[in-house]
Image: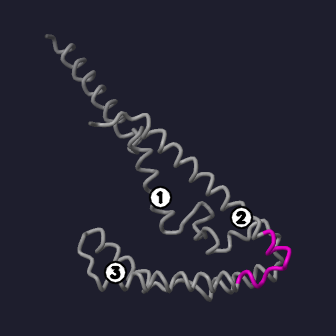
Amino acid sequence: MTLKNKVLAGFTLAAAVGSFAVSGSAQDTTVTGAAGVEKRQKAERGAKREGMHKRGGKAGFRGMRGGMGFRGLELTDAQKEQINTIREANRPDAAVREEMRSIMQARRAGTVTDEQKARAEVLRAQSRQHRETVRVQMEAILTAEQRAQLETRRQEMQQRMQERMQKMQERRQQRQQSTPSRS
């Protein structure tokens, strides 16, 4: 092999190594495909669990707890302000939430005691009572017409829920009938 060929082979090798190094460093390191989608969805679920939604990172409310059941009732500005005041005054206690979380972790681990079970039941009852009190306070702000609209919505929602439960029960029965018995 001549010196010219050796130099040319060296330059070719250096160019190849350089191009691979540049293309390798320019690659996107994010995970794509099913694994990437799953990782992104898991992160979104975690953010939602923390109360963060796509509304600029502000915490969102769900159901009647946060007054979302009042959406579409055309509340006045004064009513909205009163509802926000009630909501702020009745925020859940972080210590109680943490206590319930530790009891639930113990339950999942299988180490829950009878005292913890009793305490969890007391906390749940207090929480239900508190939610009911807040609901009554919030509904007291509404006009008679708004209350009627809200009641109509509740009945419609309850009807839809019953229909869904009925369909689920029918599908369950169909599956049981179509599955051969294991005798």
The percent coordinates of residue 36 (x first, y second) are: 41, 44
What's under tag 3, amino acid-wise?
Lys
Badge number at residue 159? none
What is the quadrant of residue 108 in the picture?
bottom left
> Would residue 158 be counted in the magenta stretch?
no
What is the quadrant of residue 97 in the picture?
bottom left
- N-terminal of the pair, mark 1 or mark 3, is 1
Tag in front: 1 or 2 = 2
Query: In this figure, which residue is indicated by the disc labeled 3?
Result: 117
- Position of the N terminus, as image quadrant, is top left
Real-space Cα separation, disc 1 to disc 3, in angstroms: 28 Å
- N-terminal of the pair, mark 3 or mark 2, is 3
Query: In this figure, which residue is indicated by the disc labeled 1?
Result: 45
**Left or right for 112, reference 136:** left
**Left or right for 57, reference 182:** right
Farthest residue, direction left: 1
- Position of the C terminus, as image quadrant, is top left
Badge number at residue 155? 2
- N-terminal of the pair, mark 1 or mark 2, is 1
| Residue extent of the magenta highlight | 138-149
The percent coordinates of residue 135 (x first, y second) are: 66, 81
Question: Which of the pair 107/90 is nearer the observer?
Answer: 107
Tag in front: 1 or 3 = 3
What's under tag 2, amino acid-wise?
Gln
